[in-house]
Image: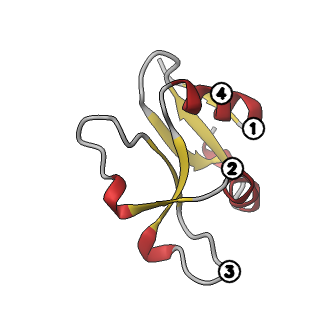
Amino acid sequence: MAEATTDHDTIRSWAEKSGGKPAAVKETHQGGDVGIIRIMFPDAPNSEHEWLVEISWDEFFREFEERKLQLLYEKDSLFSKLVSRDNG
């Protein structure tokens, strides 16, 4: 069952334990605009990381807060989805 969180430490810890990195969709990451953010898992099968560019956790969380997002995730899998906090 998926859990929801907005806690930066929880998100970073969960992602990094499985090799996850903060990322932005290349097509939307231009100039000073971070664009659409994701957590990428480069070593995961079927990962589409070629469409992503790694960004810093600071950039990720700045955009995360500006867009008022939350992370839906499963503790023991790579499932994650960024959604509006209004949906929670």
Callout 4: helix, strand or loop? Answer: helix
Crowding at dot 2, Cα within 10 Å, few <14 / some 14-19 / many 20+, comes out as some
- Dot 4 or dot 1: first in sequence order is 1
Disc 3 designates what residue?
A: 32
Disc 4 from disc 2: Cα separation: 11 Å
What percent of the width, then of the height, locates residue 20? 50, 37
Q: Given this view, does label 2 or label 1 mark the residue nearer the observer?
A: 2
For marks 4 and 1, give the one nearer the viewer: 4
Position of residue 9 measured from the top left corner of the image (x, y, whole percent): 75, 31
Q: Residues within 10 Å of mark 4 (few under 14, many from 20)?
A: few
Which residue has dot 1 on it? 8
Q: Which mark is residue 57?
A: 2
**How far, Cα to Cα, is label 1 from label 3?**
22 Å
- Nearer to us in this view, 4 or 75: 75
Residue at image point 35% right, 63% down: 51
Q: Is residue 66 left or right of residue 37?
A: right
Callout 3 touching callout 4 (CB < 8 Å): no
Determine the secondary structure under disc 1.
Answer: helix
Q: Is residue 81 found left or right of 87 in the rendered image? A: left
Q: Residues within 10 Å of mark 1 (few under 14, many from 20)?
A: some
Type of amino acid under label 2: Trp
